[in-house]
Amino acid sequence: MSDPMVRFENVTKRYGALTVLDQLNLDIERNEKVSIIGPSGSGKTTVLRMLMTLERINDGVIWVDGEPLTHMDRNGTLVKASERHLRRVRGKIGMVFQHFNLFPHMTALQNCMEAPVSVLGLPRDEAESRASELLDMVGLGDKKGHFPIQMSGGQKQRVAIARALAMRPKVMLFDEVTSALDPELVGEVLNVIRNLGAEHDLTMLMVTHQMGFAREFSDRVCFFYGGKIAEQGPPDKLFNDPDSDRTRQFLSAVLEAG
Amino acid sequence: MSDPMVRFENVTKRYGALTVLDQLNLDIERNEKVSIIGPSGSGKTTVLRMLMTLERINDGVIWVDGEPLTHMDRNGTLVKASERHLRRVRGKIGMVFQHFNLFPHMTALQNCMEAPVSVLGLPRDEAESRASELLDMVGLGDKKGHFPIQMSGGQKQRVAIARALAMRPKVMLFDEVTSALDPELVGEVLNVIRNLGAEHDLTMLMVTHQMGFAREFSDRVCFFYGGKIAEQGPPDKLFNDPDSDRTRQFLSAVLEAG
Amino acid sequence: MGIGFMNEFALGFSVAALFKGAAVTLFVTTGASIVAIVLGLAVGLVRVSTLAPLRWLAVAYIEFFRGTSMLVQLYWWFFVLPIFGLSLSPWTVAIVGVGMNVSGYGAELVRAAIQSVDRGQYEASTALNFPRLTMMRRIIVPQAIRGMLPPWGNLLIELLKGTSLIFFITITELTTASKLAADATGNYLLFFAVALFGYYLIARAIITPLVRWLERRFSRGFIREAVA
Amino acid sequence: GSAAAGELLDKIKAGETIRVGFSNEVPWAYPGDNNEPLGFVNAITIDILKKMGTTKIEPVVTEWGSLIPGLQAGRFDIITGGMYILPERCRNALFTEPLGTFADALLVPKGNPEDLHSFDDVRDKELMFVTGAGYNTVKNAKNVGIADDKIMQVAGPAEILQAVKAGRAAAGSGTYFTMKEFADKDEAVELADPFTPPVIDGYPGLAFLPNQQEEVDAFNAALKDYIGSEEMMKSVEPYGYSKANLPDGTPTAELCKG
Amino acid sequence: MSIWDWEYVWEAMPYLLQGAIVTVQATFIGFAIALVLGLVFALIRQSQNRIISGTMAEIIEFIRSTPLLLQIFFVYFVGPQFGIVIPAWTAGIGVLGIHYAAYCSECYRAGIENVDGGQWEACTALNLSMARAWRVIILPQAIPPIVPSLGNYFIGMFKDTPILAAIAILEMLQQAKNFGAENYRYIEAITMAGALYLLFSLVASVIVQMISLWLNRRYHLQ
Ligand SMILES: Nc1ncnc2c1ncn2[C@@H]1O[C@H](COP(=O)(O)OP(=O)(O)OP(=O)(O)O)[C@@H](O)[C@H]1O
Ligand SMILES: Nc1ncnc2c1ncn2[C@@H]1O[C@H](COP(=O)(O)OP(=O)(O)OP(=O)(O)O)[C@@H](O)[C@H]1O
Ligand SMILES: [Mg+2]
Ligand SMILES: [Mg+2]
């Protein structure tokens, strides 16, 4: 079917008086890799959190895989989504956080097994084999029995990715997954994401400050500014000759820093 | 006089069994700008913390401005430094921290006045004028009455720099002063440091992950690895054709990330 | 005559009586602790439930039992309640009365511990689509328990001390026993010192080690040594 | 709750366990080291109950002040503390015929330094006076006009002795028996001699709930030929009760009128 | 006799209020002692010298793990055995103060340890003296956050005052009991006493919250 994997339709998000996202419209196609860049406070994280239903939206509709996420269709009219509906649609989305949020009291393997067993109801052995496959894939075959505290930041983040994949999502969200890492650990995580993009049918939406990676990896880059998409397009266009001065300004600031 | 501003002489630092710095020897000339780079855990921060007397050293001697810092000369033999001696020599050193460590219950101005008044015993008005000069210099003339929570990371870090300068140190230490900042705020802080180097007679020692800046700014770059100086030299040499593979490896990893 | 003849033997007898008192204190402490822990956990979990009315009930419970002093509550249980037709035995009042009073504080500990679990853990659980109860059971509570163990240790010591009030409801526990012994012999220093040390011993040789042991058991994944 | 009329009597006849309430008042009624009921009031009660049909006694020890509430709360069936029969008490409890006649005494430090011989002396010299909380002595003291803040109300006899010994109070009052006991065994105190008590002798009786007339009648019947008998004296003499203490024939009804 | 009789409530009230005054006095004086002594304990506890800090810690443990009632008995009865007679009021409030000083010191400690280590490092880097660092930098950050827990102990002490009755101090509950003993009516007096305790502690907790808000604003902490 032709409708996009994710669609934001006039989505507005406010915190009290502060309007964080203003009438956002954004479509993401199946298997498209989209990077979101922009200054701090521009609403990047909020976009992902709304999609992950970690934040309620004040206005508009979010569509996932052709059906409304935050609402449900009751004979023609859209009504607020029930918990059941939310949980069904949410199942199609996975998220990786800036600060990993691994479960500290579980080993890498248990982290990846818990949800498949207690949410999807997989039998333990099946969940286990799936989990260890994924851990092998992210290059942590030898760390399965380790607890998060025994792992480096880069390793933790790779476990987090495996944990999200274990739920077989169609869309993966990444929020600055490398900015809590020591520079020389960033590479190993980006490699995992790179391969993920290459080998799996996954729609990916990532907030990042790694201009280099965004450029090389993504099909499209969206530059957020003050809760709006100030500019978007293929990376080469956006990085080489951006239309808006805001974009140019931001890029020069960031590159000077790098 | 000819002796260096700072001299590490066979300095060793251990944490229990772990030897963090092993027989370190390092001279820093007056007004020299030295950058320290290296992987996480290689001992970079420890070097600065020892110089700031935030960590005791297990062996060796640190010399500052020709006199021993951690020891004092009692008729020929070096004995453990007294608190008085420590405080006198420490007065020549200032430090800026990764996480600012501003005093949250004081305004920017008060942060810069506290030590000059209570340590140097300056009269309040003199301390105040000195403080506000410095705040103007770091471009925060309009933020003097603000409290830390009311400022952005970049602004906080600039206050921290002004606070350290208010003590008129001869040596300034910077420990990853930009790595807690949002990318687009990094520039403003680096600019301040840049001007500092240009306009004042200051010996500067900085730990950084900003290769670009290290390269452009410093007279010498030291690459730390496993508690030793694996390689050091002028930035162009070290960045363009490093002697050791370790250095090469590290640089490629970091640059790929940037 | 009278207590005249008592005196010579009083010391020997009183020491025996003191041990009985200690035994009583231990017994009541154990019983009341169980009551306090069970009710504390239950009420604490209700306190963080998503259903407002339930929450209010928990708040009322907590405020009531923390609002008035244990002594007043014991008086009420023991002397006033019967007049409304419910007469509980002294032992029941001791265990339930002390236990419920402490459970009010315990519930607060549970609440605090649960709410102090990193928000990221809740968000990760949502992202992985956990139903709320599963999330609580598998992710939040296991982490909260570790956080609340030390304060529970202190609370149980409070409870231990609280049992010294059950004298007012006709039970002769350690404090009373030492008082009676001291009155009979006139040697206040000896018997009070012994009693003080007795409590200290129970707290430091039984309660504290027990809690430490539990802490170690629940520390998997939080402290390097604990998992090495 | 409070037993229905006749219930208690049936229990006694049926040989069931009867709970007697008293506080630590040597030699009237006090607990032995295994809490067994000692003291002459308990001795009398045990004899009487045996005649009436039960030998099962459960002692309940509490503060003097808690005896009446304990009875009202159904914590025990009979107060054997040796309460004087007084009008206001008659309104809240039923008393048997008197078990004897006793005087109060005034306990003072050795040598009676303040030269006290009556409550009036204590009042006039404005000295601190100690007695038990809930003792009839409190009312007597107030009646002769000793100021409220000069009346120290403590938990029991032991505290009275301590207060006088420690000089916290200039004089203490309790029953002749108890005070004599202290004077004999402790050389730091003595009885005021001569001493004119504020009221003539006190008449202790056993106290029941107001609705237990049947029980009281039964007890009185049993008491009639028991009072003064060989059997009685054998039980009570060890506690210092002598023939001089036998009742003078004043009926309870009259004492209740006051 | 009826279960509840308002007559007795009104009769009891004057006594209860009289006791309430004593209770409130005891609480305030006692807590003042606890606050000051507690800080002293806490600072000794922070001493670099292992023996000093260790001993202090053990003393605090001991005070915290033995019953207030017993401690009061000890001071009140043992003293005279050796000719030292401390007045009941002094003994009672003194022990209350020391007992809660042990708790407050733990609060202070928590507050001090929660101050970011970076603050100490900044003080060293700026060469501030130990005393100055404590007074101007550390304590102003350490204390406001712990005001709520200090407040809880304030209320806790208030609710412990009935124990003073054991050494014949006429606080509220003792007044209630004495009233009962003289009139043989306990329900009303005791229940009203309970109600008053509840009322007072609710009021107190509101006041504490206000103080803590004010302090946090005053020192611009979160
Ligand atoms: N829970 C919240 N309450 C109030 N304001 C919030 C909340 N979360 C975010 N905001 C505000 O919403 C705006 C957007 O936040 P968001 O985290 O999306 O920015 P961002 O683009 O992710 O910034 P960064 O690059 O620093 O992560 C910011 O101004 C932030 O202050
Ligand atoms: N207080 C401490 N106790 C024990 N080990 C410590 C302590 N502080 C530092 N270390 C260890 O000393 C080594 C060097 O630490 P240091 O902070 O100097 O590294 P670094 O080069 O600054 O790393 P980074 O780039 O992450 O700041 C590390 O292995 C660290 O684990
Ligand atoms: Mg963000
Ligand atoms: Mg470092």
Image (tube, coloured by chain):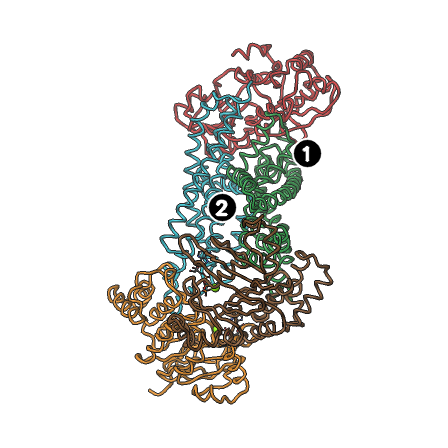
Chain colours: A brown, B orange, C green, D red, E cyan
Image vertical order of residue E91 relative to residue A203, above or below: above
- Crowd rating for badge 1 (residues with CA inside 10 Å; few <14, some 14–19, many 20+): few
For the residues bearing labels 2 and 1, Cβ distance under 8 angstroms: no
Labels 2 and 1 in the same subunit: no
Q: Amino acid at mark 2?
A: His
Q: Amino acid at mark 1?
A: Asn
Does residue D108 appear in the picture of this structure?
no
* CA gap, disc 2 and disc 1: 33 Å
Q: Nearest to the eye among marks 2 and 1: give it.
A: 2
Numbered circle sitting on residue E99: 2
How far across and down, in percent of the image, does residue A83 sit? 59, 50
> Camera-side residue: B221 or B203?
B221
Image vertical order of residue B16 relative to residue C155, above or below: below
Image vertical order of residue D104 relative to residue A107, above or below: above
How far across and down, in percent of the image, does residue B255 sit? 50, 80
Q: Secondary structure at mark 2?
A: helix
- Crowd rating for badge 2 (residues with CA inside 10 Å; few <14, some 14–19, many 20+): many
Q: Would you name the residue on which mark 1 appears?
A: D34
Numbered circle sitting on residue B56: none
